[in-house]
Image: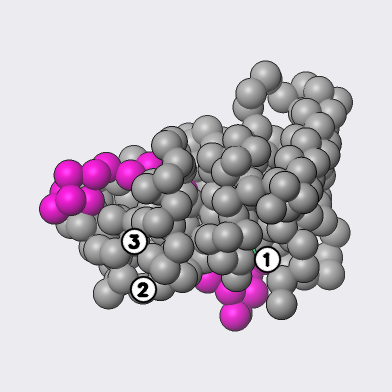
Amino acid sequence: MQNARENAAGRLEIIRNRIERARRRFGAPPDNVELVAVSKTFDAEAIRPFLDAGQRVFGENRVQEAKEKWPELRASYDGIQLHLIGPLQTNKAREAVALFDVIETVDRDKLAGVLKVEMDRAGRQLPVFVQVNIGLEEQKAGIAPAETPAFVARCRAEHGLDVVGLMCIPPEGDPPGPYFAHLASLARDAGVARLSMGMSSDFETAIAMGATDVRVGSALFGTRG
Ligand SMILES: *Cc1c(COP(=O)(O)O)cnc(C)c1O
């Protein structure tokens, strides 16, 4: 127990220091980079040491899995901010709005419309990111880069969503830098401030390209089974 707590605190400190060094090196404004600790596949007991060490922002990619562990954790810790970082089906939108604080994966009009209805019903206007399929990969979710500024405008004007940023997962195996730079340029075109990009293997590159939210899983929690 004590060991798990020390390990979590140590890993958090290492990642926070690396974020801080990258942020300084690239001249990002202070406190501009949020660490989203991606706890998918890890159970509540594995997450507690990170909460004990002060981490409050977490990411999960499945509604069902989040439902199984986060209500219990929220009962013991204040100030948790949970990001949905995986694809969302419209029939899970109600549960997602109840469980999460930020939805990072809005990528189509139907989902945007249903989310707005569910947010109104719940009286919870959650900030959202638009997910961009930055490498135009067939198997990946996200709106096409060329359609992104118009989609963001529709999410705001027609669907009434609070769009705060863009999110992407670059193609595996390619150098990520150019994809991150492309997302940053789309965010400028779309008029959104936040950029959710960068994972365990490339978050420093993402910060160099302007990331404001880095999603780090295995470098904190270890390899997933
Ligand atoms: C799993 C996941 C991450 C974290 O990946 P690591 O390589 O373990 O840091 C980040 N973003 C998304 C969307 C994920 O699904």
Stretch of the chain drawn in magenta: 119-144
Tell me whether the residue at label 2 lies in contact with that at label 3, contact meaning CB atoms closer than 8 angstroms: no
Q: Position of residue 174 (x, y in %)?
A: 83, 65
Q: Nearer the viewer, mark 2 or mark 3?
A: 3
Q: Which residue is mark 3?
A: 96
Could you tell whether 75 is left or right of 131 in the image? left
Q: Residue at x 33, y 50 (%)?
A: 155
- The kind of secondary structure the magenta stretch mainly shows is loop
Q: Residue at x 28, y 56 (%)?
A: 98
How far apart, in angstroms, are the residues tagged by discs 1 and 3? 26 Å
Instruction: Indicate the secondary structure of the residue bearing disc 2.
Output: loop
How far apart, in angstroms, are the residues tagged by discs 2 and 3? 10 Å
Q: Nearer the viewer, mark 2 or mark 1?
A: 2
Please say if 20 is above or below 157: above
Q: Which label belongs to residue 135? A: 1
Q: Position of residue 56 (x, y in %)?
A: 54, 40
Q: Ligand 1 within 8 A of label 3's CB? A: no
Near mark 3 (Cα within 10 A), the count class, few <14, some 14-19 or many ≥20, is many
Q: Position of residue 13 (x, y in %)?
A: 78, 36
Residue type marked 1: Gly
Q: Earlier in the sequence, mark 2 or mark 3?
A: 2
Could you tell whether 130 is left or right of 187 in the image? left
Residue type marked 3: Ala
Which of these two is toward me, 67 or 153? 67
Residue type marked 2: Gln
Q: Ligand 1 within 8 A of label 1's CB? A: no
**Image quarter of the C terminus:** bottom right
Q: Earlier in the sequence, mark 1 or mark 3?
A: 3
Q: Which residue is mark 2?
A: 89
